[in-house]
Image (cartoon, coloured by chain):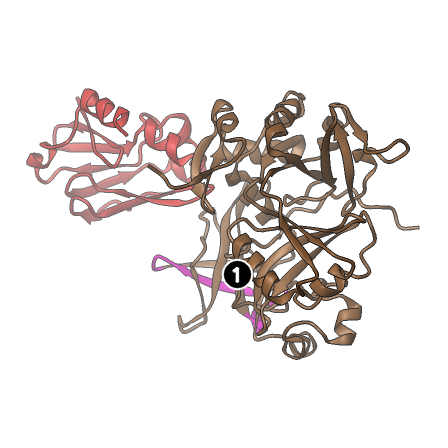
Chain colours: A brown, B red
């Protein structure tokens, strides 16, 4: 028997025809009707993803934002209530321990971290945050993601109400905004964000109400349940790194091409872990860089394939690779030497003794379709 | 014509000393959407169990082995343009390659349709 933990929606996934696999210590649906169909459905309509394996945390205390800044390079103090920011949990040497979303709820910070790293993250935060900061792991809450151009249309139909009279409804949120809502008196935390490159929402819901909410969503004609397989191909097309694959504790934010996560105030103060090393890389460039690759032909290159120089010597690695359902061709992310990281550079990859040719391409591979707040 | 099956979910049609090889409906179902197939070149001589073809789904790459020893007579060129034939017609149009059969004794130990069904049901 498998030792995998069951998520709150386990039996619901099986009833929906989900094929369950082991992932990050949990039994999770890899696909329902097929990765290709689910992928394309999400791009043109809306998909419902169960991401309850991810860690939902609260940091509580008046100085929580300042305290968190000791271990992330983002300007968390400047994050207004109702706003969400992507940031990185950094080790002392500048390696990336995790990537995460931070929301200022107005009362505390709400964090969503990766499932496979959540226990290490909690231990690391407890070590590095003062005792005055409370850290709660919201293990009683499930997390659903509704993603796709018709996500808002579908979400608007299931009767989610403002948390208080006069407060907004979910579809009034813009990209990277969040708030509390009520659904049949059930409290929901909803952010307009996701991991597919599409417009969409992430919905935190008490575990015992998750099944009813998931069912209410897939009862909408726009919405189908989507598995981990399409989640991975969607995020790859969107150019979004996957922790433990494209980024890890041996990559720095600059090598990972995540320099946007270094907020201006924090760069000027140079007060995050390994700031001098990371800022020097930002100034002078790192020796290697994460890039997107379009692969010639139809055969995908996969994670672990070697990037080689003219002499066949390994100079980099593919960290994610697959077939892009939207583009109809293989794409990949890889670390390549700085000199070869320019757009249009030709990269040679070796996989199972066979050479492949890749061209460095701009990411996202498929344009993002976020519901951004109009600039005034 | 006799059809045999392997525990690697390949089917083998035998006609005289020639074999046609593909993957089963169960195998394509497990692999999911096939996006690429590489078939062996004619004239390649393969021992039983050697890597013969590569099949790639959206998610992962898998090897297809030579279920018997012999020489490759032809690969299915249609799969280069339409790899999804393996999904839509795994046990007919989506065949992978034909080969000569150098040792008919190797067919012993392969499963017939009934045995293969029982094998799949046991998984």
Q: Residue at x 48, y 59 (%)?
A: A318
Query: Looking at the picture, how far across and down is residue A241, in whole percent?
Result: 59, 55
The answer to whether residue B23 of the structure is visible from this angle is yes
Query: Looking at the picture, how far across and down is residue A36, in whole percent?
Result: 52, 35
The answer to whether residue B35 of the structure is visible from this angle is no
Magenta stretch holds residue A5? no
**Quadrant where the image shows the N terminus of chain B:** top left
Q: Is residue A273 above or below residue B12?
A: below
Quadrant of residue A121 in the image?
Answer: bottom right
Quadrant of residue A265 in the image?
Answer: bottom right
Of residues A250 and A137, which is closer to you in this image? A137
Magenta stretch holds residue A341? yes
**Number of callouts in the render?**
1
Of residues A206 and A102, which is closer to you in this image? A206
Q: Residue at x 52, y 26 (%)?
A: A12
Q: Chain of mark 1?
A: A
Q: Quick one: which residue is furthest to the right in this view?
A: A376
Q: Quick one: which residue is furthest to the left in this view?
A: B105
Q: Is residue A173 above or below residue A290?
A: above
Task: Residue under label 1, please give it.
Answer: A334
Of residues B72 and B57, which is closer to you in this image? B57
Q: Is residue B69 left or right of residue A18?
A: left
Q: Residues within 10 Å of mark 1 (few under 14, many from 20)?
A: many
Q: Is residue A333 above or below residue A11?
A: below
**Quadrant where the image shows the C terminus of chain B:** top left
Query: Looking at the picture, how far across and down is residue A314, in whole percent?
Result: 42, 70
Q: Is residue A2 left or right of residue B15?
A: right
Q: Write down the region rendered in magenta.
A: A337-353
Secondary-structure class at tag 1: strand
Query: Looking at the picture, how far across and down is residue A123, in whole percent?
Result: 55, 60
Q: Residue at x 50, y 29 (%)?
A: A32
């Amino acid at each position: 028997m498998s030792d995998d933990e069951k998520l709150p929606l386990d039996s619901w996934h099986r009833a929906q025809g989900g094929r369950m696999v082991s992932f990050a210590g949990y039994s999770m649906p890899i696909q329902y009707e097929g990765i290709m169909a689910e992928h394309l459905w999400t791009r043109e309509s809306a998909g419902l993803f169960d991401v309850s394996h991810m860690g939902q945390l609260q940091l509580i205390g008046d100085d929580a934002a300042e305290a968190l800044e000791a271990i992330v390079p983002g300007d968390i103090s400047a994050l207004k209530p109702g706003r969400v920011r992507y940031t990185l949990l950094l080790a002392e040497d500048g390696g990336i321990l995790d990537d995460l979303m931070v929301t200022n709820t107005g009362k505390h910070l709400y964090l969503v971290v990766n499932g496979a790293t959540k226990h290490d993250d909690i231990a690391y935060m407890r070590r590095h945050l003062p005792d005055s900061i409370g850290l709660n792991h919201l293990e009683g809450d499930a997390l659903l993601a509704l993603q796709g151009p018709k996500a808002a249309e579908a979400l608007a139909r299931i009767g989610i109400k403002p948390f208080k009279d006069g407060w907004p409804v979910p579809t009034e949120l813009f990209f990277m905004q969040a708030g509390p809502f009520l659904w049949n008196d059930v409290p929901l935390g909803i952010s307009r964000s996701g991991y597919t490159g599409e417009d969409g929402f992430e919905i935190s819901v008490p575990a015992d109400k998750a099944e009813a909410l998931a069912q209410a969503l897939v009862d909408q004609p726009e919405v189908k349940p989507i598995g981990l397989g399409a989640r991975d191909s969607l995020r790859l097309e969107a150019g979004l790194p996957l922790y433990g694959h494209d980024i890890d504790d041996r990559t720095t934010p600059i090598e990972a091409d995540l320099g946007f996560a270094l907020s201006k105030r924090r760069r000027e103060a140079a007060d995050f872990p390994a700031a001098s090393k990371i800022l020097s890389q930002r100034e002078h460039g790192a020796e290697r860089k994460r890039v997107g690759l379009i692969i010639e032909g139809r055969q995908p290159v996969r994670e672990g394939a070697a990037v080689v120089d003219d002499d066949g010597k390994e100079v980099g690695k593919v960290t994610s690779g697959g077939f892009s359902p939207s583009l109809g061709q293989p794409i990949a992310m890889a670390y390549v030497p700085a000199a070869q990281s320019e757009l249009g550079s030709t990269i040679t990859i070796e996989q199972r003794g066979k050479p492949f040719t890749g061209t460095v391409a701009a990411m996202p591979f498929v344009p993002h379709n976020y519901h951004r707040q109009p600039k005034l | 014509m006799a059809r045999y099956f392997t525990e690697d979910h390949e089917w083998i049609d035998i006609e005289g000393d020639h074999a046609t090889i593909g993957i089963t409906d169960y195998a394509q179902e497990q692999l999911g959407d096939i996006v690429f197939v590489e078939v062996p070149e004619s004239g390649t001589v393969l021992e039983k169990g050697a890597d013969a073809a590569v099949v790639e789904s959206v998610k992962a790459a898998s090897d297809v082995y030579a279920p018997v020893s012999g020489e490759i007579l032809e690969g299915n060129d249609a799969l280069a343009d339409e790899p999804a034939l393996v999904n839509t017609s795994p046990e007919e149009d989506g065949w992978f390659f034909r080969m000569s059969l150098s040792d008919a004794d190797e067919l012993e130990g392969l499963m017939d349709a009934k045995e293969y069904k029982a094998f799949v049901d046991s998984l």
